[in-house]
Amino acid sequence: MQNTSTDEALARLLSAGRARAALAGPEHVTLWDSLRSATEGGRRFRPYLLMSTHDALGGHQAAAAAEVGAALELLHTAFVIHDDLIDGDVVRRGRPNVNGMFAQKALSLHQNSEDADHYGRTAAILAGDLALTTAVRAVALCGAPAPVVRQLLDLFDAGLHISAAGELADVRLSLQHGQASLEESLLMEAQKTGAYSFSLPLQAGALLAGADEHTVERLGQAGLLIGIAYQLKDDLIGVFGDPTLSGKSATGDLRANKQTPLIVHARSTPLWPDLSCYMGRELDGDELQRARDLLMASGSRSFVEHLFGEHVRDARSLLDEVGLATDMFAEVLGPPDALTDGPGVAA
């Protein structure tokens, strides 16, 4: 799925950034290297969507598309770094993330755990900020015509605002102790995932290809639907998946009291009093299995699978309307019963 031209553009951006970091001192180089490490191992799904859309719509700005694709990957990296920080995670893809890396470094220098954690969190905030500014710089200097660059910057700006709103809503809803509605939960998932993971790359690819306003608009709508479908599938993996294959904890969403549509629906069923005791805390294997059994018996898993199917159908209709093949979304739009297919788009 990786695109060589995008990888080359990303490598150039990271190398140029490291050269600037060196001017600020060795500690800042270490911070930049941790950011570079955070970009490794991903599947480059968002750049792939951008490049595929650009090519499918007859675009002729491959070099600019590669630069914007690299910017998308840096934007994703920034969100991942900050998301780990928000969730209190210190490991990503089986190794210490930026937070964990700098916390370990502080501990190796005999700092106490509280100071080490503070150092790790500080590094994560700064690394994410650097990734964001580098992404915006890459778009501004991508080489596309000035009017297109302005539209691209508007898209990135909107994606940042919407994703930030979704991230904040995710935390806010988890604090409401069972007050979130299904509409609020779906909106949060559309904002947190659909905007920057799907709408942004689809629309950016279309703009670079010179597509008309109607096509760009419809692709934005399709992206939000695909994003919700992906997130619904990810919610199921987050409870029913095999962590060794999915790379995602099977207890994290329950422990964090995430107000996903799966949980919102379960709360409306007669089995909720039995299930609620498994929310907001760590679960052992037997407790997790009991929670899974209750989610299935309540019909909540089936409800989410049906909701997934509805969003997939509507997204396919929009993609067909603009003449964009759906095969590039095969993994995302595949049936949610394949819960152990390996790391998903967010990886």
Image (cartoon, rainbow, N blue to C red):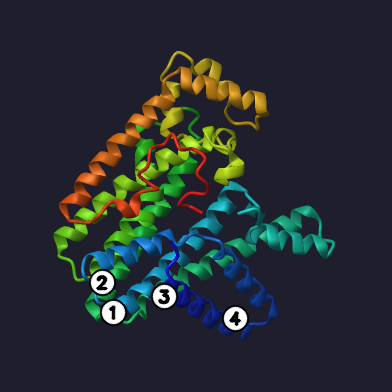
Q: Amino acid at mark 1?
A: Ala
Q: Which mark is residue 107?
A: none
Q: In what element is the residue under mark 4? A: helix
Q: Residue furthest right?
A: 110
Q: Are marks 3 and 2 in contact (CB under 8 Å)?
A: no
Label 3 and label 2: CA atoms lie apart by: 16 Å
Residues under numbered marks 1 and 2 in contact, where contact means CB atoms less than 8 Å apart: yes
What's the distance in space between the residues labelled 3 and 4, CA to CA? Answer: 24 Å
Element marked by disc 3: helix
Q: Earlier in the sequence, mark 3 or mark 1?
A: 3
Local crowd size for mark 2, using a 10 Å CA cut-off: few (<14), some (14–19), many (≥20): many
- Of all residues shown, which one is farthest toward the top? 270
User: What amino acid is at disc 3?
Assistant: Ser
Q: Are marks 3 and 1 in contact (CB under 8 Å)?
A: no
Label located before the other in sequence (1 or 2): 1
- Give the spatial CA distance, label 1 vs label 2: 7 Å
Residue linked to disc 3: 5
**Which residue is disc 4 drawn over?**
21
Which residue in the structure is indicated by mark 1?
A: 144
Crowd rating for badge 3 (residues with CA inside 10 Å; few <14, some 14–19, many 20+): some
Residue occupied by mark 2: 208
Q: Residue at x 57, y 67 (%)?
A: 127
The amino acid sitting under disc 2 is Leu
